[in-house]
Image (cartoon, helix red, strand yellow):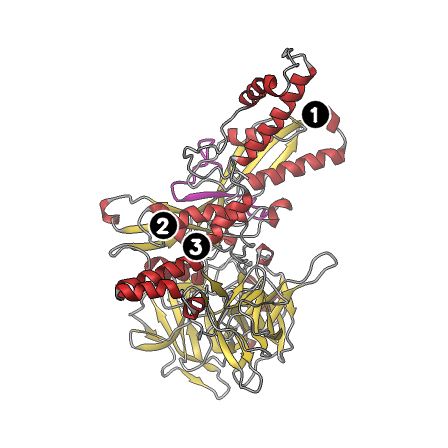
């Protein structure tokens, strides 16, 4: 086992004899042990045997001079290094109710949902991380503004004196215009909700009753408006899909097409932030939601006149909550204590995820009340009275405090030296003659942590199992509700599972340990920040790059580009990986920031950000070798080329070394030529064209660069994925 990343320090051989030295040493001993042997010619059969055994001895010494894998593992154990357990993937799960309820409805923490089980794949189970309350939203204010502001101050109340609130929660009154009579981009209106209701993360349906037979002049399929909610730091988009707007940008075109009446109303379904705080802007207080008249897309019309409504109401139809890939196991009996130190027990499920406050071990001694014991990282600071235990998260092994017997000679010499220094010469002689006695025997043993009394029943109150890259599921994969919940009609995930990682291997631990010893848990250099950021994420971050300061104004600011772990199964299916799969979750960002802030130098500010992803689409022609003239063989070659491109142009698996596309490295046509030359069956290539995709606002725009090079910039990272609407996929034609 070689570790090429280790420093190449000079190594001394335990036995430095070479093959030539061994042969010469044997020949020199021939006259002593076999004097009748006088022919030392290389063709002599005896010399051949000497060379054979010299070669075998040389091979043995070669292994003897290397540190075996087992020794390296022992060194890691002496340092207290443990292989990290799998990291669970996380996503947001949306529950939809079968009907709007009159009271607040609670979905408890730990509710289990899962993907569909097939003949070849087991279901992947997720559990909600907290309880979800689906409340009764109520609109408090309807406000309009001439311009869009991050902190709105100039507002006009449109409800006061014009509209009335009925007992069923519906506002109605005179005809009301959203925007100016001559609307222009930047006009917006605000819906301020009552602060008393628990509607964080709720999915609400805002019902608008429009004025009949009016035209707004827009294209209903591409309305120039944007829905946002204030999450305490910024305005967050809340319209998940265009199909959720059944008013079609307040044009009510769908109702008119199906023969309906806008006065009956149409819903807009909005997914509110999971943290939606009560905020005060100007003199109005509540939870803020707004709709902005945005700039139309190219070649799309604007609003000719402002949309008008005569009624407005809102109701909750569901809610979203964070969930992690885990299964909860409760009240598992581990066995009965034999009263011996260091005893171990095995959990039925493993690997075990990081324990919560409610997950612990109960020890019930005979005839006594149950005792709650506490988990620790190790027994180094445990005294015999401490009710401590440790759990190996990878194997699910539970161990109680061991009894350590220290070397007797060291203890005796230490005790004698201490007594000799404090006694008279006559007493010293008596001690030497009498020996150390019973006290020394007892002092040779030390108990680390308490031992459960003999006959005690031991049980694990609760623990969770799961984790791994299999939890990085695709959008819409979670559809099964494992727990029976009334009033819940369906469940779905609108975001992919992110940050799942398999258990750490020995090779990964060997790479991590040098960085751990170098940083000593303190962030000073750029390499320290990169290593500690990966450690803080628990394996959820795959790659980190610390950016150099651009100017004096950035002195004291450390900027880190973070690339999370993601599911790479789409590469093998020739679908690639969308940039949204590498999005940083707020929880993970906060977790890493808190960890780094405790270890950075005073005066240093840490800022975390995502790379600027640039999509690359390749279009080329290939000619295959004559033996691949069959259509099936040609399709297999083309499929291999597609997969190779998606793997090569990828932040996790791409690049010349296959360890992820380097930060800031451009893509050249010669890179594609070099890649295709490594695939058997390709005879030659035609012209290689590279198209780039860059994000402008919320949309991706595909273009042909002026130079045949795609430069992502110093903050950029290359990726590729298949999307027919964006034409982001690779096209390979046969010549």
Q: Quadrant of the C terminus?
A: top right
Q: Is residue 724 magenta?
A: yes
Q: CA distance from mark 3 to mark 1?
A: 49 Å
Q: Decide: few, some or many residues near mark 2? Use Cα within 10 Å; few <14, some 14-19, many ≥20.
A: some
Measuring 52% from the left and 38% from the top, which residue is drawn there?
A: 2
Q: CA distance from mark 2 to mark 3?
A: 11 Å
Measuring 37% from the left and 47% from the top, which residue is drawn there?
A: 518
Of the residues tagged 1 and 2, which is closer to the observer?
2
**Element carrying mark 3:** helix
* Residue 478 in the figure: left or right of residue 21: right
Residue wearing tag 1: 625
Q: Is residue 303 visible?
A: no
Q: Is residue 484 magenta?
A: no
Measuring 74% from the left and 34% from the top, which residue is drawn there?
A: 633
Of the residues tagged 2 and 3, which is closer to the observer?
2
**Element carrying mark 2:** helix
Residue wearing tag 2: 519
Q: Position of residue 358 (x, y in %)?
A: 50, 75
Contact check, label 2 and label 3, Cβ < 8 Å: no
Q: CA distance from mark 1 to mark 2?
A: 53 Å
First in sequence: mark 3 vs mark 1: 3
Of the residues tagged 3 and 1, which is closer to the observer?
3
Residue wearing tag 3: 535
State the count of labels: 3
Q: Is residue 125 visible?
A: yes
Q: Position of residue 671 (x, y in %)?
A: 52, 31
Q: Which residues are magenta?
A: 704-727
Instruction: Give the quadrant of residue 156.
Output: bottom left
Contact check, label 1 and label 2, Cβ < 8 Å: no
């Amino acid at each position: 086992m070689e570790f090429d990343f280790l420093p190449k320090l000079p190594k001394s051989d335990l036995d430095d004899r070479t093959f030539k030295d061994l042969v010469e040493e044997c020949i020199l001993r021939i006259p002593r042990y076999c004097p009748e042997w006088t022919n030392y010619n290389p063709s002599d059969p005896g010399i051949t045997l000497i060379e054979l055994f010299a070669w075998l001895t040389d091979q043995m010494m070669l292994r003897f001079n290397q540190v075996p894998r087992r020794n390296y593992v022992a060194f890691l154990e002496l340092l207290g290094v443990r292989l990290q357990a799998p990291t669970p993937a996380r996503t947001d799960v949306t529950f939809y109710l079968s009907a709007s309820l009159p009271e607040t409805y609670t979905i408890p923490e730990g509710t289990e949902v899962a993907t569909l089980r097939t003949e070849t794949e087991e279901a992947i189970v997720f559990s909600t991380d907290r309880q979800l309350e689906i409340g009764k939203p109520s609109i408090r204010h309807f406000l309009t503004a001439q311009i869009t502001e991050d902190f709105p101050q100039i507002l006009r109340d449109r409800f006061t004196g014009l509209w009335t609130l009925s007992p069923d929660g519906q506002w109605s009154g005179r005809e009301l215009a959203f925007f100016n009579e001559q609307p222009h981009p930047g006009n917006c209106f605000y819906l301020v909700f009552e602060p008393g209701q628990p509607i964080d993360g709720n999915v609400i349906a805002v019902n608008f009753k429009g004025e009949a037979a009016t035209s707004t002049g827009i294209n209903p399929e591409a309305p120039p408006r944007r829905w946002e909610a204030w999450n305490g730091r910024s305005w967050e988009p809340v319209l998940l899909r265009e199909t959720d707007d059944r008013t079609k940008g307040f044009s009510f075109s769908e109702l008119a097409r199906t023969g309906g009446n806008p006065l009956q109303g149409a819903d807009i379904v909005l997914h509110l932030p999971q943290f939606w705080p009560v905020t005060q802007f100007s003199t109005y207080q509540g939870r803020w939601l707004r709709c902005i008249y945005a700039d139309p897309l190219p070649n799309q019309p604007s609003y000719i006149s402002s949309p008008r409504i005569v009624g407005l109401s809102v109701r909750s139809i569901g809610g979203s909550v964070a969930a992690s890939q885990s299964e909860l196991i409760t009240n598992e009996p581990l066995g009965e204590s034999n009263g011996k130190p260091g005893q171990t027990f095995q959990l039925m499920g493993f690997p075990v995820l990081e324990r919560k406050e409610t997950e612990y071990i109960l020890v019930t001694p005979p005839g006594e009340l149950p005792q709650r014991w506490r988990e620790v990282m190790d027994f180094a600071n445990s005294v015999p009275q401490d009710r401590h235990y440790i759990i190996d998260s990878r194997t699910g092994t539970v161990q109680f405090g061991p009894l350590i017997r220290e070397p007797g000679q060291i203890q005796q010499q230490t005790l004698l030296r201490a007594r000799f220094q404090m006694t008279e010469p006559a007493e010293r002689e008596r001690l030497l003659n009498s020996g150390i006695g019973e006290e020394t025997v007892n002092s040779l043993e030390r108990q680390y942590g308490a031992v459960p009394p003999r006959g005690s029943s031991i049980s694990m109150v609760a623990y969770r199992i799961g984790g791994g890259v299999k939890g990085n599921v695709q959008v819409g994969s979670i559809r099964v509700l494992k727990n029976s919940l009334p009033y819940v009609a369906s469940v779905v995930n609108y975001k992919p599972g992110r940050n799942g990682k398999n258990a750490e291997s020995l090779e990964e631990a060997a790479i991590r340990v040098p960085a751990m010893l170098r940083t000593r848990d303190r962030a000073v250099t750029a390499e320290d920040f990169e290593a500690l950021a990966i450690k803080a994420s628990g394996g959820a971050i795959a790659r980190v790059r610390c950016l150099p300061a651009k100017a004096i104004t950035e002195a004291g600011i450390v900027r880190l580009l973070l690339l999370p772990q993601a599911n790479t199964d789409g590469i093998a299916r020739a679908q690639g990986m969308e940039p949204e799969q590498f999005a940083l979750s707020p929880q993970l960002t906060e977790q890493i920031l808190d960890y780094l802030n405790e270890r950075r130098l005073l005066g240093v500010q840490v800022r975390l950000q995502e790379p600027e992803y640039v999509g690359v689409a390749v279009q080329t022609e290939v000619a295959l070798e004559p033996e691949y003239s069959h259509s099936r063989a040609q399709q297999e070659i083309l499929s291999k080329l597609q997969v190779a491109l998606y793997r090569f142009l990828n932040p996790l698996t791409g690049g010349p070394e296959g360890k992820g596309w380097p930060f800031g490295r451009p893509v050249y046509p010669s890179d594609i030529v070099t890649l295709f030359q490594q695939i058997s069956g390709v005879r030659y290539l035609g012209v290689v064209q590279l198209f780039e995709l860059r994000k402008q606002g919320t949309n991706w725009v595909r273009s042909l660069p002026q130079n045949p090079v795609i430069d992502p910039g110093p903050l950029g990272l290359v990726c590729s994925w298949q999307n027919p609407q964006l034409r982001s996929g690779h096209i390979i034609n046969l010549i």
